[in-house]
Image (cartoon, rainbow, N blue to C red):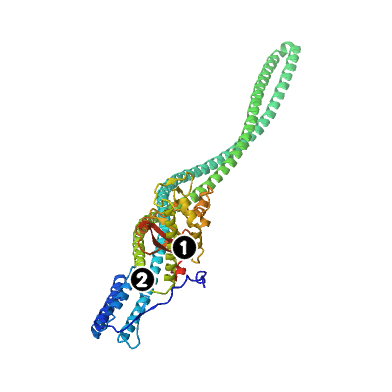
Amino acid sequence: MSAYESLPAFAPVHAARPVRLGGHLSASALSLALLVCQLLGAGLLLFVAEGPLRLLAALLGVVGVALALWVRRPNADLQQLVHSLAAANGERLDLSHDLQVAPGSPCAEVAEHYNRLLARLRQMVGEVQQRSLSISLASAQGRLMAEQAAANAGRQEEFSELVFHSSEQSATAVQEVSLRTTSIAQVNERNLEVARSSQQEMAEVSRQIAGISETMEAFKDEVGQLQNSSASIRGILGTVLDFAAQTNMLALNAAIEAARAGEQGRGFAVVADEVRNLASKVGAAADQIQGLLQQMSEAVSGAGESSASMIERSAQAGVSVKAAAAQFEHMVRDFESANDDLLMVSSALEELSVTNRESHQHSIGIRELGLKISESMRQSFSQADVLRVDSNHASQLLGSFRLGHGQLEATCDQLRDYAARIRASMERLLDQGVDLFDGNYKAIPNSFPAKHEVSWARPLREALQELVDEAGRIPGMVSLIPINSRGYVAVNRTEVSQAPTGNPQVDAQKSRFMLFSVTDKHDLDNIANCRRLGLGSITLPNGMVALATFLPLTLRGRHWGAVGAVVLPQAMGVTPAAH
C-alpha cells in the first residue's frame, strides 16, 4: 500500500436519494419523461464520448424512443416528473436521484428502468471521469517527459555539434599529419640513401687507410734497411779513412827516406809525394762521404720516426673510421627501421583518414538527426499542450455531473465548501471597505522571487491565513489558495509564507506569497474564464504530477478570480500511470 492509499478519504457524499412520486403517471407523460431522460443521457455521452461509447449512446437513444412509444397508459403526475427532470438538469447535471413510485403503480416498471439507466449512467460517467483525469495526468507527465526529452535532445544536439566540429578538426588534423608524415617519410628515404652512400664511402676510406698503413709499414722496413746499409757504409768508410791515414804516413816516411837518399831517392820522393797527395784526397773524399752519410742517416732516422708516427696515426684513423663506419651501419639500420615505421604510420594514417572521413559523415548524420529530433520535440510540445487543453476541457465538462458517490465528488464538494467560506470572508472585507479589485501593484525591490505589494494583500492574508492552513492540513491537499485573474497570490500556507531571507534559493521555496505565482497563459485563461469547477493537471516543482482544480470566485456579482487547489491524484481516487 502506498503512502497515499493509506490516507483517509474526504468526507463522503450521502448515497443516492430516491424521489417519491405520488399517484399514477400517464402513458404520454412517462413516454415523454423517458424520452427526455434517455435522449439527455445519450446526448451527453455523444458529446463527451468517443469510439464504442458513441455507439452505446446511440443505442440508448433508440431504446429510449422505443420505450416512450411503448408506454401508453395515462397518468396525472407528469408535472411532478417534469419538475424532477428539470431539477436534475440544473447547473450541475444531477444523476444522483433515483425515481421511486408508489407500490403497484403502473409506472413502477418505467421507474425501475429509469433507475437502472441512471445507475449505468453514473457508472459510465464515473469511469469516464477517472479515465479523463488519468489522461490529464498522463498528458502532464507526457509534457514533463517531453520537456526532459527536449532538454536531453538539446544536450545531445550540443554534443553532436561538438562531435561534428571535433570530427571536422580531427579530419583536418589527420589529413595534415598524413601529409607531414608522407613528407617526413620522403625526407627519411632521401636521408637513408645518403646514409647508405656515406656508409659505403666510409668503408672505402677504411680500406684505403688500411692500405696506407700497410704501405707505411713497408716504408718503415725499407727505412730500417737503409739505416742498416748506412751503418755498413760507415764501417767501410772508416776502413778507407784508416787506409788513407796509413798511406799518408807511409808516403811521409818514404819522402823522408828519399830526402836522405839524395839524388838517388829523388824519383822515389816524387812518387811518395804523389802517394801522399792521393792519400790526402782519399781522406778528404772519405770525410765528405762520411758527412753525406751522416746527413743521410739523420734523414733516414727522421723518416723512420715520421713513418712510425704516420703508422700510429693511420692506425688511430683506421680505428676511428671503423667506429664511424659501424655507427653509420647502425644509423642506416635505424633509418631503415624508421623508414619502415613511417611507411606503416603513413599507411595507418591513410586508413585513419578514411575512417575519420566516414566518422565525420556519421557525425553530420547525427547532427541532422539531432536537429530533426529537436523539431519533433517542438511538435510534441504542441501536441502535448493540445492534449492537455483537451483533457482538461473534458475533465471540466465531466466535473459538472453529480453522481452522488465517489471520492472525486467528495473531494470536489469539500473544495466547493472551502471556496464558499473564502468567498464569504472576502465579501466581509468588501463590506469593511477593502478594495479587493485594486490593481495598483508595486514591486518590492531586491526580492526574489519578485514580490509585489498591493493595498488588499495584508488584509486578505490576515483574513484567510487560518483557513488556507486548515485546508493545507487535509490529507492529499497540497495547497488551496485564492488567485485573482492576473495570477497574483497574496496568501499561501504559513510554511511557505516566511519573510524573505535574501537567499534566492531559500526564498523560492519558503517565501511564495505576494507574487504573481501563475504566469502560464493557459492557466491565466482558465482563471479569468473560470465559471464552474475546472479540473486539470499540474507539474509540481519536485517533478510530481498532481491535479489542479479551479473554482470560480465571484464577489458581489463581479468575477475576481478563482480558488485554486492542488490535490494529489490518490486523494481523488486516481492512480497516476507509472513512468
1 vs 2, front mark: 2
The location of residue 575, given as percent across then percent down, is 45, 70
Amino acid carrying mark 1 in the image: Met
Tell me the quadrant of the picture where the C terminus can be found.
Answer: bottom left
Q: Residues within 10 Å of mark 1 (few under 14, many from 20)?
A: few
Q: Which residue is mark 2?
A: 401
Contact flag, marks 1 and 2 (Cβ < 8 Å): no
Please indicate whether residue 508 sits to the left or right of residue 101 in the image.
Answer: right
Q: Looking at the image, which is closer to me, 302 or 516?
A: 516
Disc on the earlier residue, 1 or 2: 2
Please indicate whether residue 223 sits to the left or right of residue 387 in the image.
Answer: right
Q: Is residue 232 visible?
A: yes
**Considering only vertical position in the picture, is 467 above or below 78?**
above
Q: Residue furthest bottom?
A: 104
Using the rendered view, name the quadrant where residue 521 is placed.
Answer: bottom left
Q: Is residue 579 visible?
A: no
**Considering only vertical position in the picture, is 25 above or below 132?**
below
Q: Residue furthest top?
A: 263
Mark 1–mark 2 distance (CA, rounded to whole Å): 28 Å
The location of residue 38, given as percent across then percent down, is 29, 78
Amino acid carrying mark 2 in the image: Phe
Tag shown at residue 544: 1
The location of residue 446, given as percent across then percent down, is 48, 44
